[in-house]
Image: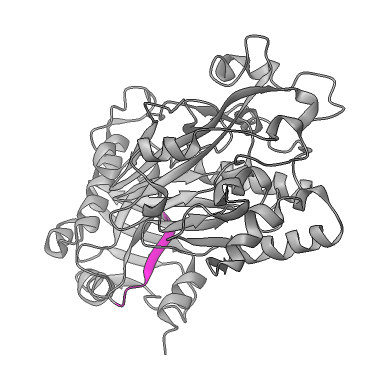
């Protein structure tokens, strides 16, 4: 039966559409955590139920994929299990699902897909790469380029040579794509277009990569098998039987959760049952997964930070609130590209110091009007008009100091993409910005712009 409605999310100008292949099923804890006697979900039932657990407290797992539509691309992210297969687990044998019909009903006929991004090459993420027609396995998306991770491809070749069941799908789901000349072997940080790129998340498999989406200041990440269930937000260090390199998978989860905590991006869990998407939030020693975006000063666009209610921060002084407000306005102005308006925040004795090595362009202390004339102006001239955009991820004031994290992204005038994370320290005295210290990935900047002579 064809699905009549589809879950969709808007990320700026990008639309993500969920295509569900099979209903969610209960997964016994022993599959993911064999030998674990104590319940791993019980301490977290309060936020896991009712969406991610059965009434009996078992984990729910879903099989689904996603269409990512940008202004210029139609992209499939993973392709589930597929019909007419013989698999290691009986539950996935000889399936007959209305996947193609559902794609069409969602507005995405297979021939309109231009790219298939495979987070990794396990059987339950590449099945619908092909379909059976006239006794042969042929590409389901004939006009698409299929992006296979180079490390993933090498790994599955090794598994096939060893007779490992993890490669049993190679002849029906992967090799036909290569034989048809539709496969591109890419790195784990491959950028497809301005809005979509692979983000390395190794551990589950050697070349695993999640899919990052960025548009108009908003972000989302489709996880792949970085996590299989939201409970892993709370127990990221615990080994999962599903992971190839268990220690690396744990390190990757911790790094990922730390990076996106506080609502920085919409996290779309490839195996998370409905509602499927949500946000990483700090909880106790680790994290939890919330379907609602957190409201405090983190992970929200600059324009919304300004209007935020600080009433929950009863210990903040009025001056500290005003200082935060000033910094938010400063970044809004910086992001707008209105350099003359930016001068209103800068006094003759204001200093701006990028905390980078001397060989990086922009290094040194800039003061007064030279901040705009000799530093910010030339930097913005390297970008297309209106870029880079600046988004605040966290903001905190203490006395005359304001500390914050931001992300700047945009297109350079030569067509390359810029995407960098920053930390800032402001000193504000008598309502005026007097000192700015800017911390960034200087190696990335040097690689992109070269080194100063």
In magenta segment, residue 148: no
Magenta segment, principal secondary structure? strand
Compared to residue 109, the image places residue 188 above or below, namely: below
At horizontal 63% and vertical 51% (from top left) the residue drawn is 135
Determine the image quadrant of residue 95: top right
At horizontal 57% and vertical 15% (from top left) the residue drawn is 49
Residue 18 location (% of width, % of height): 44, 36
In the picture provided, is 351 more to the left or to the right than 212? left
| Res. 403 visible in picture | no
Residue that lies at the very extreme toward the front in this rendered image:
134
Compared to residue 20, the image places residue 328 above or below, namely: below
Residue 182 location (% of width, % of height): 52, 66
Number of marks in picture: 0
At horizontal 19% and vertical 70% (from top left) the residue drawn is 369
Asked whether 107 or 117 is in front, the reply is 107
In the picture provided, is 118 more to the left or to the right than 450? right
Q: What residue range appears in magenta?
A: 414-423
Residue 120 location (% of width, % of height): 63, 53
Q: Quadrant of the C terminus?
A: bottom left
Determine the image quadrant of residue 264: top left
């Amino acid at each position: 039966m064809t699905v009549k409605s589809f879950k969709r999310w808007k990320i700026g100008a990008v639309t993500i559409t969920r295509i569900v292949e099979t209903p969610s099923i209960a997964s016994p804890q022993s599959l993911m955590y064999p030998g674990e006697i104590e319940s791993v979900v019980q301490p977290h039932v309060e936020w896991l139920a009712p969406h991610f657990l059965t009434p009996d407290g078992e984990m729910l797992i879903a099989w689904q994929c996603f269409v990512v539509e940008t202004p210029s691309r139609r992209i499939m992210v993973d392709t589930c299990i597929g019909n007419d297969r013989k698999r290691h687990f009986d539950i996935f044998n000889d399936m007959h699902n209305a996947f193609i019909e559902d794609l069409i009903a969602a507005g995405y006929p297979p021939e309109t897909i231009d790219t298939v991004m495979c987070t990794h090459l396990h059987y339950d993420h590449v099945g619908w790469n092909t379909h059976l027609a006239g006794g042969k396995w042929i590409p389901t998306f004939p006009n698409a380029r299929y992006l296979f991770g180079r490390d993933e491809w090498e790994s599955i070749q090794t598994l096939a040579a060893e007779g490992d069941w993890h490669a049993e799908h190679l002849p029906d789901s992967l090799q036909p794509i290569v034989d048809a000349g539709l496969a591109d072997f890419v790195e784990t940080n491959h950028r497809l277009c301005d809005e979509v790129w692979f983000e390395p998340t190794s551990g589950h498999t050697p070349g695993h990569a999640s899919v990052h989406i960025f548009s108009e200041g908003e972000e989302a990440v489709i996880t792949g098998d970085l996590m299989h269930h939201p409970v892993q937000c709370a127990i990221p260090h615990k080994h999962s039987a599903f992971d190839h390199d268990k220690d690396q998978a744990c390190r990757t989860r911790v790094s990922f959760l730390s990076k996106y905590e506080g609502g920085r991006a919409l996290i779309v869990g490839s195996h998370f049952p409905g509602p499927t998407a949500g946000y990483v939030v700090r909880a106790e020693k680790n994290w939890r997964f919330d379907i609602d975006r957190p409201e405090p000063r983190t992970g929200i666009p600059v324009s919304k930070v300004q209007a935020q209610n600080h009433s929950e921060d009863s210990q903040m002084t009025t001056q500290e609130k005003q200082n935060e407000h000033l910094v938010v306005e400063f970044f809004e102005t910086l992001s707008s590209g209105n350099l003359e308006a930016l001068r209103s925040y800068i006094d003759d004795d204001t200093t701006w110091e990028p905390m980078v090595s001397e060989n990086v362009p922009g290094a040194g202390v800039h003061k007064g009007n030279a901040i705009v004339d000799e530093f910010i102006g030339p930097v913005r001239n390297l970008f297309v008009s209106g870029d880079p955009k600046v988004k605040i991820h966290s903001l905190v004031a203490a006395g005359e100091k304001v500390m914050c994290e931001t992300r700047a992204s945009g297109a350079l005038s030569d067509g390359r993409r810029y995407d960098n994370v920053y930390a800032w320290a402001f000193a504000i005295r008598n309502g005026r910005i007097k000192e700015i210290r800017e911390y960034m990935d200087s190696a990335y900047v040097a690689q992109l712009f070269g080194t100063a002579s």
